[in-house]
Amino acid sequence: MFPVRDRSQPIADKATTVLACGLGVFTLLVLEPSLPARANVAQANGLNLGCAAGFGLVNITSRNVQSTLGTSTGSPNQLNGGSTVSVPASCSVAPAAPARPSNGSALVGGNARLNAGSLRADQIFRSQSATVTNGPGTTVVSNAWTVQAEADARAVATYIGGINASNCTVALSSCKFNDAVNLSGSLTLTGALSGTGGINYYNVQTVGRNVDLNFVGSARDYFVFNMPASLTTNQDWTLQGDVDPAKIIFNFARPGSNLSLTGSDVFGTFLLTGGGTATLNRSGNGNPSTITGSLIVINNGSALRFGSTTGSNRVNAVINGRPFNPTALRSVPVPGPLPLLGGAIAFGWSRRLRQRLKLAQQAVGS
């Protein structure tokens, strides 16, 4: 269903023309007409994470499970970004917590027991019934907040699971349905709604090991995956165009679903509500696992393993919080004017650049 990508080949874009002149090579960019998103209120409400929004990491369980976020002083995990500014006012804490875009916020609820260890973050929010030890800064919130966060996350999972070929194309005004999808090998997923914005929906049937995904599209594209079970990968994913990682969501609602990363860089909100867990570890050569997006684990029957406790003194796992914000579906921003002439314009996030960043992280931790 999806083509295998060859990264050695350049991506052609009908909106881009290269002009050669005596002064060098310039890029002429002709913008396509920008149209507002046609996604309706049902879409925006259906994907609204509510009290579970705005956090790089959410861990809520109804069991007395010990999860470990940090590892050791010499080998910390990092939680960057995620802003409580995205959380509805009804979920606010007293006194109000600062809503900084890079505060590295986590929400822990239920009866969870969490050892934050040497986690690099500014703030952890926990309910009165949850416990956090060795936290870098803990704010106690009401149980009602985390109960609502769990309900909101489950509602999103149910909504995504209920989308089908009929209501995607009829009831929802901007939705492309892809059925019986097999995620395996190296795949390029191209947004089909770049002119209007909306949901590219993938009803995933099977998932191969070490899937390698490349997302191509615009900032108006949403990629929504209804997952069958687990996802295990050691691959670095890529973005091309101006795809926003905060507009990618993976829905793991089946019992026992798991996310397992080994030294890979991935994008999106990973929503696990089926009683599974998530494990983020380094690769054999010391590369950390990185999520650019958010990780939400609800009612996990086993511990959340955010990084390994073994190995040399390098960063284990990183979450760069870019929480899913579905309210943007109501009014997708129109790109501002761009200069007609200029140097090379970079599309996407370079795998090579991210590899250099990984090597730099290893050098710092050595």
Image: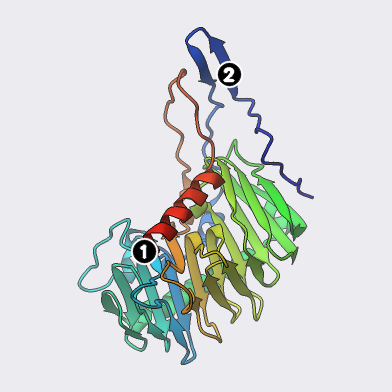
In the image, farthest residue toward the top: 22
Q: Residue at x 65, y 33 (%)?
A: 11
In the image, farthest residue toward the left: 95
User: Which residue position holds label 1?
Assistant: 87
Kind of residue at disc 1? Val
Of residues 160 and 132, which is closer to you in this image? 132
Q: Residue at x 50, y 50 (%)?
A: 354
Q: Earlier in the sequence, mark 2 or mark 1?
A: 2
> Measured along the vertical axis of the image, is residue 14 above or below residue 241?
above
User: Which residue position holds label 2?
Assistant: 18
Residue 337: % across, % down = 42, 26
Q: Residue at x 55, y 40 (%)?
A: 218
Q: Give the CA distance from mark 2 to mark 1.
A: 44 Å
- The quarter holding residue 53 reads bottom left
Residue 153: % across, % down = 51, 71
Residue 215: % across, % down = 61, 47
Q: In this rendering, would 122 be left or right of 173? A: left
Residue 210: % across, % down = 68, 62
Of residues 219 and 354, which is closer to you in this image? 354
Quarter holding the C terminus is bottom left
Q: In this rendering, would 87 be left or right of 349? A: left
Residue 105: in sight, yes or no?
A: yes
What SS does tag 2 mark? Answer: strand
What SS does tag 1 mark? Answer: loop
Kind of residue at disc 2? Val
Residues packed near mark 2 inside 10 Å, few (<14), some (14 to 19) or many (20 plus): few
Of residues 71 and 285, which is closer to you in this image? 285
In the image, farthest residue toward the bottom: 64
Q: Nearer the viewer, mark 2 or mark 1?
A: 2
Residue 173: in sight, yes or no?
A: no
Q: How is the image coloured?
A: rainbow
